[in-house]
Image (cartoon, rainbow, N blue to C red):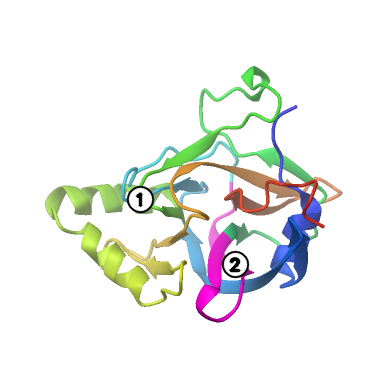
Amino acid sequence: MAYAPNQRHVDIAFSSGSLLQNGKPVEFQRVAIGQLLITSGALAASDPFVFPNPAPFTQAIPIGRYPVSVAVACYGTGDERDERVAFARVELSNLPVVSWTMALTERQDPAALEHDGYFGYGVDAGTGCFMDPVAGRLLAERMDREDEYFNVIIDGMETTYTDTRSWFDWRPSPERDENIICFSSGWGDGSYPSFFGFSADGRLCTLLTDFFILTDTENAE
């Protein structure tokens, strides 16, 4: 069976709750970080520094603006305090999630996955993001024209930085409204899966990226 998010952990994280992991407390903060504009009817996710124009997920998305939030896991206190983005999500409705389906791009077949396998996007700059594919094309064009444009993203993320997480909401083209919302990716680089959440009657609720902060399910209570 392919990997899927732990629903209980997601609920605790986005309700700003707490749990124990390996006998130590983990406190969560849900933080709203922007409104994502969807104009093409599709969503994409990637490391914007490495894949500025990612392939969209096959799941159709109604055109509109949607809240984006992150669940930040907080460890320790004082000088030893560490904060990590555990989950990021696009809130596509206010309905409760009862099931998860892996977010796939074209030619990704979940039947080919081994137990606990997943399709995810690669992160090599410690950053993930959500975007409309239109925004991805605009970002790729901007990066092609301006070799140092990546510094705009770095500088923007510095404005929200706390050890060790940050985020940034911006538009790659001043002539267009499409935006990109990026955020720190858990412990850093790796490959991270996304999932669409559905309600009990099959309606689309959310897109969630899991950064594997809470992978020790036996000891996370």
Taking 139 as reference, is 60 above or below it? Answer: above
Looking at the picture, which amino acid does disc 2 mark? Val
Depth check: 4 or 186 in front? 186
Identify the residue shown where x is 40% and y is 48%: 47
Q: Which mark is residue 125?
A: 1
Cβ atoms under marks 1 and 2 closer than 8 Å: no
Q: Residue 112 lies in what quarter of the image?
A: top right
Disc 2 target residue: 72
- Residue 175 visible to the viewer: no
**Is residue 66 highlighted in magenta?**
yes
Q: Name the dominant secondary structure of the magenta segment.
A: strand
Specify the quadrant that holds the C terminus. bottom right
State the separation of the CA atoms marked 1 and 2.
19 Å
Q: Amino acid at mark 1?
A: Ala
Residue 12: image location, x then y, percent:
77, 64
Near mark 2 (Cα within 10 A), the count class, few <14, some 14-19 or many ≥20, is many
Circle 2 — which element?
strand
Q: Earlier in the sequence, mark 1 or mark 2?
A: 2
Q: How many residues crowd mark 1 within 10 Å: few (<14), some (14–19), many (20+)?
A: some
Identify which residue is drawn at 47% across, 39% down.
121
Q: Can you see residue 138?
A: yes
The quarter of the picture where residue 149 lies is bottom left
Instruction: Specify whether 76 is left or right of 100.
Output: left
Viewer-proximal residue among 172 and 12? 12
Q: Position of residue 211 (x, y in %)?
A: 57, 50
Judging depth in this view, the residue of 41 and 197 nearest the camera is 197
Magenta stretch contains residue 74: yes
Image label count = 2
Task: Give the magenta part as a residue range.
Answer: 61-85
Taking the spot 55% from the left edge, 25% from the top edge, the residue there is 108
Q: Residue furthest right?
A: 200
